[in-house]
Structure formats: C-alpha cells, structure tokens
Image: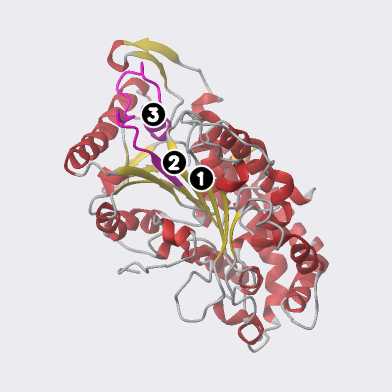
C-alpha cells in the first residue's frame, strides 16, 4: 500500500501540469474554473458560484460573474482597438493552484501583446479523477452509493490490470530506448521519413528545423530497473484517472443535470430567451462570442476582430468539443499545443469546420518525437515518455492509427495527407485559400538550453500566444516560471 501511495503521489506531479502558485490577482476577470460537476468556482474563494438546489439563482450568479469579464474586456478594448480575446484551455493533471496561478503570471504580458486572455480551467488533477473512478462514477453516471459498494471490486480490477499488463509495460520500457538509438531505424521513423519531406509540396506549412538528433546522450542516464515494476502500476491506476479526466472534458461545457434528474429549459425575460440550466458558464461565454448579428448581448465586435483558441494537451479535446457545439465563433487561429485529442477527432470535427471557415489558420505544435519518448521523471524511477506517449501506448484505446494523439509529431505528419483534403475555398473577398495552406505543422527543435519547450508540460511556460512561437521562429520564456 505504501508503494501505491508513492506511485499516486508521483503521478500527481507529472504529465502536463503547470507550476504551482498562489497569485489570485486578476483571476476573476480572466478565468472560468469548472469543477467535476460543471459548477463555476470562484477562484479567489474556491467556492461554487450560485446556490445548491436553486438553479435559477445559480444561473443568475453565473451571468453576473461573466458580465464582469465582459465589462472589463470592453473597457480595455475601448483603449486598445487591437485587443482580441484569446481562450486558453489547459490540459490534464492540473490542480486548482496551478490553474489559478496562470492569470497572475500571464495577463500583463498578454495585454501588452493586445490579447485579452480568458483561461478555461477545470479540475483535472489525479486525485479527484481517480477517486471518481474508484468511488463515484459508474458508466458515466454519478452513483455514490453503488460506487462505494463496488469500490473494492474496482480496486481489484486496477490491480489485476497492472498484473495482466506486466509483459506489455515491460516491453515498452525495453523497446523505447531502442527507438531513440540512431543505430536502429524504427518503423515509426521509416514511415515518417517517407512522408515528411513531401508535405511542403502538398501545400502544408511545415516548420521542422534542425537539430533532429541529440537525444541519445540525454536519454541514457543510469538505468533504473525500479521503473520496470512501476510501469505496470502506472498502467493499472493511471488508466482509471485518465478515464475520469476524459469524462471531465465533457463537463466543461455541460453539467450533470443534462442527463441526470429533470431537464429544465424554460423561457426567461432576464436572459432574453430560453435558458438551458445544464449549460456551464463556459457554454454561456461561448454563446456570447458567437457571430450572430441578431443575438442579444453578443460580444462579437462590429469591426470583425477575431478570437484565438489555444488548447494544451487535453485542452485540445475541449477545443474540439467547442467547435462541434459552437461553430459560429469568430475564430482566427486555432492552436493545439501537444494535443491529446485523437487524429480522428481532428479529421471528423476540425477539418469540416476549417473547410467552411477560410479565414482560419490551424496550428498543430509538437515536441520533437525523441523528446516525447525520452521524457524523464524522478531520476528514471518512473516510466519514460510524455503524457502523449503514455496515452498512445498505455492509457488510450488505440484501435486504428487515427486513434493516436494529434500532438505527436510522427502521428500527425504521417496522417496529414490523408486527414486534410486538398480542397480550395473561396472567402468573401474572392481570395483562394487552399485548406492545406492554412494547416501549420510545427516541431520544436531538440534543445538543451531552454530555448524551446522540451517537455509536455512546458508549452505554456513561453509566450504561447505569439505567432512567432507557433512558427518556431522565436520563443520567449515567461518571467515568472
């Protein structure tokens, strides 16, 4: 049991979490924090906005919270006509502290670059998600009594998964060092090389600057055999937490009451139209940002300034859900950083949306693939690999290659020609913008001097809202890491 506690504590600290902090300055004017039931949380007090059981009062309080954000944005925009909204959605393994720390670290720098940030935050920490998996959630429903009664069975299942997956987990730990060895050309490398050099000729905007090697000397530290025992435990217990985090990506937009209890939708004069109480505060925000001329209270500016959406890791999954439900948002740049969304989700949601939106550029930012494989934690006591590597080879259900993560450089470049059609679209000014010309595939070079992100959790340690960063032309680290 001590070993399991140690394992869980380690998992909490790794993955795509940000840095801890306690600076709540500006948080309420730049953040929507959603808990595991879809409730809006006051980032200063860590309390639910609204009153339990009073849906109408809760909706009114959420509206008031949003109104302060809108008023602040409009006031600043009156002073800075170039100001645009940037929605940033963080990924998994972020706790309350790491999420609420971001406004204090980033707002001033973003405003100086004419970006009004709104951070969409959600409870993606390991503990609450594994606790949900163990004690509360059964088949996607909140079943606290049944969950508590069956928790011993679920725990035994997780232990059993760890044991059953020993051969697979050990094979991964042995084969990964071979994959980064330059004396071996893996299947992944070979198939990637057959395709990557042709992407430019196909019309894609590719940033693939050298160096392309160099991990070998970094990868081979003093080899720690303990991780051979840790790998199956990460598999068995991490998978349950991963499933919980996937569930919460849906709850960023929709509360549990959408499918549990009475479904309440009623007209309301105060909200100038039908009120859907199952919508979260994030969904209410997105409705205000939609490009609809007859919409009451819309924030869509008359001069047509655009919005950037930036999704890091599992935040890209939330971004995909946003596009599926709110296609009329006036987005100019859609940016995925180390996206944990599946390639299939990009193909089925993002691509059709891009076809109808010729003004939008799509940016898919990736670490160097050898960095993905060789990411190292705790002196090699933990299995190597970034969160994307763990998803593709451990946590996720991968039935076809398109079930792999879109943020992996090898995955996306090998599938780009198939996923993004060679289509041309004519926009309002009769300017041809072929789809592939608007798809930017960026790989950050291998670097040992902090110039570029080298770990999955480092994408947002830089001024990630700048186009020069998306193109891997320049990267500026934030002053307060």
Is any part of residue 237 visible from this angle? no
**Tag 1 near tag 2, CB within 8 Å:** yes
Q: Please tell me in which quadrant of the rendered image residue 474 appears.
A: bottom left
First of labels 1, 2 by sequence position: 2
The residue nearer to you, when weighing 441 against 71, is 441
- Label 3 crowd bin: few (<14), some (14–19), many (20+), radius 10 Å: some
First of labels 1, 3 by sequence position: 3
Tell me the tag on residue 361.
1
Q: Range of the magenta residues? A: 281-309
The residue nearer to you, when weighing 61 against 70, is 70
Relative vertical location of residue 391 with respect to residue 479 in this rendering, above or below: above
Marks 1 and 2 sit apart, C-alpha to C-alpha, by: 6 Å
Residue at the (52%, 25%) spot, across then down: 258
Q: How many marks?
A: 3
Q: Secondary structure at mark 1?
A: strand
Marks 2 and 3 sit apart, C-alpha to C-alpha, by: 20 Å
- For this view, does 121 lie left or right of residue 210? left
Marks 1 and 3 sit apart, C-alpha to C-alpha, by: 25 Å
Q: Secondary structure at mark 2?
A: strand
Residue lying at the far bottom of the rendered structure: 222
Judge depth for marks 1 and 3 and give the one in front.
1
- The residue carrying mark 2 is 332
Give the percent coordinates (x, y) of residue 427: 51, 31
Relative vertical location of residue 202 with respect to residue 262 in this rendering, above or below: below
């Amino acid at each position: 049991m001590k070993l399991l506690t140690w394992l869980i504590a380690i998992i909490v600290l790794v993955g795509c979490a940000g840095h801890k902090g306690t600076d709540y300055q500006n948080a309420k004017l730049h953040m929507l924090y959603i808990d595991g039931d879809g409730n809006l949380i006051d980032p200063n007090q860590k309390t639910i906005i609204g009153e339990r059981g009073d849906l109408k009062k809760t909706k009114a309080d959420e509206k008031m919270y949003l109104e302060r954000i809108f008023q602040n944005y409009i006031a600043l925009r009156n002073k800075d006509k170039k100001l645009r909204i940037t929605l940033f959605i963080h990924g998994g393994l972020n706790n309350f502290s790491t999420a609420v720390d971001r406004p204090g670290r980033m707002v001033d720098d973003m405003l100086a670059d004419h970006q009004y940030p709104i951070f969409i935050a959600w409870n993606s920490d390991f503990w609450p998600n594994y606790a949900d998996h163990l004690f509360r959630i059964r088949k996607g429903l909140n079943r606290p009594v049944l969950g508590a009664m069956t928790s011993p069975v679920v725990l035994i299942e997780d232990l059993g998964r760890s044991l059953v997956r020993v051969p697979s987990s050990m094979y991964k730990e042995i084969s990964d060092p071979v994959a980064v060895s330059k004396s071996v050309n893996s299947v992944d490398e070979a198939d990637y090389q057959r395709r990557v050099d042709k992407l430019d000729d196909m019309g894609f905007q590719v940033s693939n600057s050298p160096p392309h090697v160099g991990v070998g000397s970094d990868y081979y530290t003093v080899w720690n055999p303990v991780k051979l025992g840790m790998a199956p435990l990460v598999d068995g217990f991490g998978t349950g937490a991963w499933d919980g985090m996937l569930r919460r990506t849906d709850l960023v937009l929709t509360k549990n009451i959408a499918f549990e209890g009475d479904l309440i939708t009623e007209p309301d004069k105060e909200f100038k139209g039908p009120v859907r109480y199952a919508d979260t505060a994030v969904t209410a925000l997105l409705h205000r940002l939609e490009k609809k001329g007859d919409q009451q209270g819309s924030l869509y500016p008359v001069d047509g300034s655009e919005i950037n959406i930036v999704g890091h890791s599992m935040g890209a999954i939330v971004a995909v859900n946003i596009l599926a439900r709110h296609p009329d948002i006036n987005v100019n740049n859609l940016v995925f950083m180390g996206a944990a969304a599946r390639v299939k989700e990009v193909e089925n949601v993002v691509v059709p949306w891009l076809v109808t939106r010729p003004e939008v550029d799509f940016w898919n930012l990736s670490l160097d693939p050898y960095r993905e494989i060789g990411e190292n934690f705790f002196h090699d006591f933990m299995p190597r690999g970034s969160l994307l590597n763990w998803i593709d080879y451990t946590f996720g259900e991968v039935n076809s290659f398109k079930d792999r993560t879109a943020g992996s450089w090898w995955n996306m470049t090998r599938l780009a020609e198939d996923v993004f059609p060679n289509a041309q679209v004519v926009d309002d000014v009769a300017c041809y913008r072929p789809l592939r010309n608007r798809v930017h595939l960026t790989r950050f070079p291998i670097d040992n001097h902090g110039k570029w992100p080298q770990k999955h959790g480092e994408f947002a340690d830089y001024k990630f809202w700048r186009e020069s960063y998306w193109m891997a032309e320049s990267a500026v680290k934030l002053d307060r890491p």
